[in-house]
Image (cartoon, helix red, strand yellow):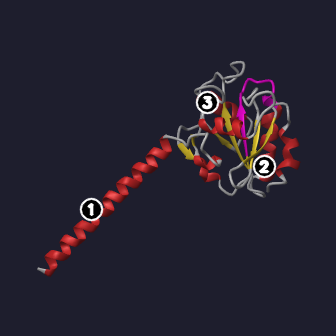
Amino acid sequence: MRLFLSQIKKAVVNSVNARKYVAYSSTMADQMQNPQDPKKASSIFEFNAKNIKGEVVPISDYKGHVCIIVNVASQCGLAGNNYKDLVDLHEQYGESKGLKILAFPCNQFGNQEAGNTDEICTFVSKRNVKFDMFEKVDVNGSNAHPLWTYLQNTVKGTISNKIKWNFTKFIVDKEGKPVERHSPTTNPKDLVKHLEKYF
């Protein structure tokens, strides 16, 4: 009888644990597929984004790192200098200071990132890009990625908060707070004095 009661108790415990696991898994799945409302978010860590391979990445993976988040476009006239400087920054500060660069291809400005994923990967591979590339997104409008809506509304722009062009750069501190916004014409190498305040 004691063995029978023990088996029943064990079965009940296993059943409760199973339900808890299912509920937890469901919650995590919802969070992965439904990023935080940009109006309610308090940091970038409340969002998810798909990397260039189509894999969902929790931005919370970047906790403890100073980040540059930038919208990129392969055919933009600013691409050459920006990619070169971003690669140099990553090589210089990636390991020594933990700098992370999150690059989001975007085709909203002059149709300058019209290529598919393979073409984007080929382009950045030729430029020795080792920093993190994400899936192509919109950064403005009703279809804008929630992370980008959060960024532009947290660090205000001039005249309007909208992203003005390719290679707009946001600096985010180690707590996930966007702290600075820099224009497309600002060379990444000129961000060093700004980054050093947050390392």
Q: Nearer the viewer, residue 66 or 113?
A: 66
Give the label on residue 91, or none.
Answer: 2
Quadrant assignment, res 142: top right
* Of the image marks 1 and 3, the number of the one nearer the N terminus: 1
Residue marked by disc 3: 144
Q: In the rendered structure, which disc, 2 or 3, sits on the residue that comes first in sequence?
A: 2
Q: Is residue 70 magenta?
A: yes
Q: Secondary structure at mark 3?
A: loop
Name the amino acid type tagged 2: Glu
- Relative image position of residue 89 (x, y in whole percent): 80, 46
* Other residues around mark 3 within 10 Å, as few (<14) / some (14–19) / many (≥20): few
Measured in 3D between alpha carbons, the distance from the residue under mark 1 to the one under mark 2, in whole angstroms, is: 50 Å
Residue 15: which numbered mark, if any? Answer: 1
Above or below: residue 94 compared with residue 56: below
Magenta segment? 68-80
Q: How far across and down, in percent of the image, does residue 59 sit?
A: 61, 48
Q: Going 80% across and 34% down the picture, which residue do you hit?
A: 82
Q: Looking at the image, which residue is at 65% across and 35% down? A: 149
